[in-house]
Each structure stands twice: as structure tokens, then as C-alpha cells.
Amino acid sequence: MTDLTRMSAADLSKLITAKEVSAVEVATAHLDRISAVDDRVHAFLHVDREGALEAAARVDRGEVTGPLAGVPIAVKDVVTTKGIPTTAASKILEGWKPPYDATIVERLKKAGMPILGKTNMDEFAMGSSTEYSAYGPTNNPWDLGRIPGGSGGGSAAALAAYEAPLAIGTDTGGSIRQPGAVTGTVGAKPTYGGTSRYGLIAFSSSLDTPGPCARTVEDAALLHAVIAGHDPRDSTSIPQPVPDVVAAARLGKQGDLSGVKLGVVKEFTGDGSEPGVSAAFKDSLEALVKLGAEIVEVSCPNFQYALPAYYLIAPSECSSNLARFDGVRYGLREGDDGNRSLEEVMSLTREAGFGAEVKRRIIIGTYALSSGYYDAYYGQAQKVRTLITRDFQSAFEKVDVLVSPTTPFVAFPFGSRTSDPYQMYLADLFTIPTNLYGGPAISVPCGLSEGLPVGFQIMAPTMADDRMYRVAAALESAVGTLTPPAL
Amino acid sequence: MAAISREEVAHLARLSRLAVTEEELDRFAGQLDVILQSVARVGEVAAEDIPPTSHSVPLTNVYRDDVPVPSLTQDEALSGAPDAYEGRFRVPRILDEED
């Protein structure tokens, strides 16, 4: 029999609908694959075998139907799942079982998608390598000695290791796209407000965006269509219809980009990228030109300030959001021996529960928001956000989408950047501008450099998510998908 | 821009309710300094006339009709609490003994 774990979500769905395989068989194949390889990959923090099989059985009984009914999925551990442990990869939430589902999880369940389990990540989604998980890193299936990207390294690695056909990620500064790039998978950050944040454990509220991770562009679009759309429980959710991303991906797959203008961001083509990354990017541009696309160089002069602005805005919001972890309502409580005050218990709990990167960002955020520094740091960063938005808007008057490599370098070996936080932050150099602007962006595999995957990023105007799917699918049709070495 | 001192990190940690260790103070002071020196570049684009953007989606108050709907039960709300007492969250004492 065909190996069900190697198939796309679209193909699995066809087989399930035609009753050629049962949803239970599909879920079992993936659960068995997790049992066989996850001790080496460590993509999962928690596997819900029983829950996944029950959900699959409901599809087989005909109780749930839909385009992805019966197709299993892995969910990043920063998204709440009722009754299934949710830790955001932090010790402070060890063993917590949320009493409610995130909106996107409700939508997955309604669509009949069995949830295989929760995937590893950098603690509270802060990081670019999944080395900051309190439960140990995830290994990149392409080379187990290298990082799988971050913060959604678990979701991306689960796809590359064929443990799940689809996964949910969240993207605050690139945490869906960057792991996608370094694992040779597809990761899409929808328009901010296009997917609901209700039920995400908040990191940086004005930037966090949940979105799809997949092995093909069409699969990403199918999942995007399931989770996107207005949610009255999220005040930043956009009350507008979601563009038809599935139709756009299928159109793109036909490989015709006549009349489409691709803007190459001049500031991202300098000497910041590894030579192998630049070469794969250049080859991909040539492939897109052969499909009829026109390349236009555009300048976005303020993109150079995106990284510094992000590293003021995100920690500021994180210092505020993480104040809720105080040892009172959920999670860890340390030092409560009857003699210590609430404040002491709170400080000891947070010291014991948070890892180094989370503490660093809380302290930076507290500094940036403190009296006397607010205008110089946070206020300035918010002005930069305006300038970056203007750069995007002026670029989109000339071109349909902007393109760049997704990351400046391929997957690096474990430990090579952890001693210097700023070097680590550079991993998100090309992905961050989009988060500050709010538009959608996708990373598609575009080739190899030194045997490791390179990602190609496509950025589109706000609420024009369909546009990026069309170009992404066209690129995929030209360069093909990547197959990692056998585990 | 002023360098960030070990004492300043200790102060910020206190404000953040983080009981950082001596070793962390040394390590963070150096690292935070590098980060702040790097992010100081945002000051280069200081133009007065540029309005700040706090959110990429324009925010407005969202109301619904005032109709009671089911919410978490008391048991569900307390289900993750480290300690509860008579249906409420129990916290350590708030006042010091001297107070």
C-alpha cells in the first residue's frame, strides 16, 4: 500500500472522501510514524493518540464532512486545546490543560481534522531556532545536528519528518516562514487579523498571527481556508470575507504568471545572505520569469530599521502579556511556604518558570517602556512601523508582490548562535518587515545550498493573501518540492 | 546612549518580578547592552511629523448585544490554579509581617 504519511493533504482528502482509505487508517499511519521517529526529531511535546483516533472515527461514521475532513494535523503548543496539555514550551505552564479551545482549534475540529498533538517551539514563541524550548530542542530532519528554525520548529519538523501532513504555526516575526525555509516546507503568515488570535497564548499582540504549515502550497491554502475568517471574540479580527486562496493556489499551479510584476527588494539583495541562498533565490527568479513574470527592482529604504523596531516592540508587548504568569490562576507556584509574601512568591515563580530568552525580552521590554526611555525607544519604534508600512504601500503601487529570500542563511548547527542573542535575531531579518506592516507572506522551498533547504519569500498587500498563493504555487510548479533524506 | 549596568538590570528585574540570579545579572547586563546598542538605530529616523502606528489594523471598540452567554464554570476557571480555597484562587499573604 502507498505510504499514507508521504501524501499531500489534498490527496489524502480525496482518498478519504472516496472511502478508499478510512480516516482512522490515515491517523494511525501518522501516529505510528510519530512513534517510530519522534525520539530522534522531537517535534512533539504531547501526542493525543486517543483524541485523534476518536475524531477520525467520527469522520468515518459520516458525522463530519468537509474539504479536509479526516486529514490529521499537529498544533503548535502556544495554541490552547481543551483538555490537551498546552505549555507554550515553558516550565511555567507545565501540565496545564486549558478549559477552552482557541477559535482556530474549534475550526479544525468542526472541519473534522484529527489533532495528533502539540508541537515543540521556542518558549512563548520567542526565538529563531527552537533551542529555547524548556523541554529540549527539535532536530531538523534534514540534519539532526541542526536547528529546525523557530519559533515553530516543531511544526515544521513534524512535516519534514512525515509525522503530520499539516500543522498550525504562529508568526510574530517570522516563526512560521523561517522554520518553513530551513526545513524545506511551506509556511504562510496570513494577513494580521485574517486569522483569529483568540486562544493563542499572547506574545506580542499587535504582531502575532496564526497560520498554516504544509508540504505543498495547495495544502497550505486548504488549511488557510479552514482557519481564516472573522471572529467576534478577537477585536482585531477583520470583518471581511477571506479571499479565495485555494482557487488562487490552483490557478498558480498551472504555471502562468503573465502580467504579474514581482518586486525584488533592493535592500535585501546586498551582502547579507549566504552565497548559496542568494544563488538559489536568483535561480528561482529566472524560473518565475520563464513563467511570464516581470521583475522590477524596488527600494524599501526603511526596511533596514525593521529589526531594531521589532526588538523594541515585541519585547515591550511581551513584558506586558507575560505579567499574567504570576503563580495565581494557572501554572507553576514556587516558594509558597507560608512565610513568603505574594510578591516574593511571584518573583520566585517567574524566576523558576521562565527561561533565559524570555527573561531577556521581559527585561528589555520593561526598559523600553520605562519612564524616560519610552519616547526614545518604544515611541520611535512605532514611528518606524509607519515608515515601513509606507514603504510597502508605495512598493505595491508599482508591483503585485514583493519577493526576497526567507532567511539569510540555511539551518545552522545547534549552539552556534545562542551565546549572542543579536546574531540569533538576524535569522528573522527578512521576515520581520511584514509583521510590522501586517500583510501576508509565504515561504516556499526554492532549492538547496550545501545540501540544506533554502526558502523563497513572497509578500503581498494586506488582505491580498490570494495573490501570494498564486505566485507561490507557480514557483512550486517550476522548482518542485524538496524531499529530505530518510530518517 | 548610556550603557546598561548590572544595577540597572537588577532594578528592571525587580520591576518585572523576576528574582534573577547573580550569574544571570552578569550575563544579561552584557547581552542587553549589545541588544540596546543595536536597536538604538531606530533613533536615526526620528522625524517629528511621523505619526506612530501601534497596530496594523485600525482598532475600534467592538460591542455585542448585552445577552448573557455561557462562560467558563467556576470549576473550569479554577482547574489550572496552583491553589484554591472555597471556590476562589488562594494567594500567599499580600502584606509583610511588619505591615
Image: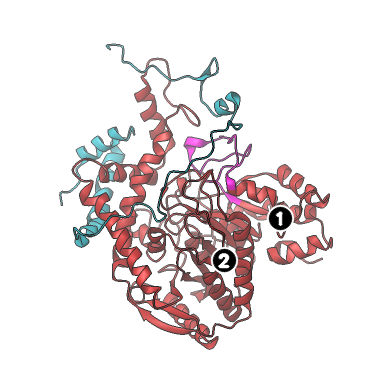
Q: Which amino acid does label 1 sit on?
A: His
Residue at image location 79% in from the left, 47% down from the top: A58
Q: Which of B23 and A105 is in front in this view?
A: A105
- The answer for how far apart the CA atoms under marks 1 and 2 are is 17 Å
Q: Where is residue A70 in the image (x, y as percent from the top left)?
A: 74, 55
Q: Position of residue A248 (x, y in %)?
A: 60, 71
Judged left or right of residue A413, residue B45 is: left
Q: Which of A246 and A349 is in front in this view?
A: A246
Name the N-terminal-most of marks 1 and 2.
1
Q: Chain B in the picture: what colour?
A: cyan
* Residue A276 drawn above or below residue A322: below
> Looking at the rendering, in which quadrant would you find the C terminus of chain A?
bottom right
Q: Chain A in the picture: what colour?
A: red
Q: Mark 1 points at which residue?
A: A30
Q: Where is residue A134 in the image (x, y as percent from the top left)?
A: 48, 43
Instruction: Check if mark 1 and mark 2 are on a common chain.
Output: yes
Magenta extent: A75-103
Q: How crowded is mark 2: few (under 14 residues within 10 Å), some or many (20 or more)?
A: many
Judged left or right of residue A362, residue A121 is: right
Is residue A95 inside the magenta stretch? yes
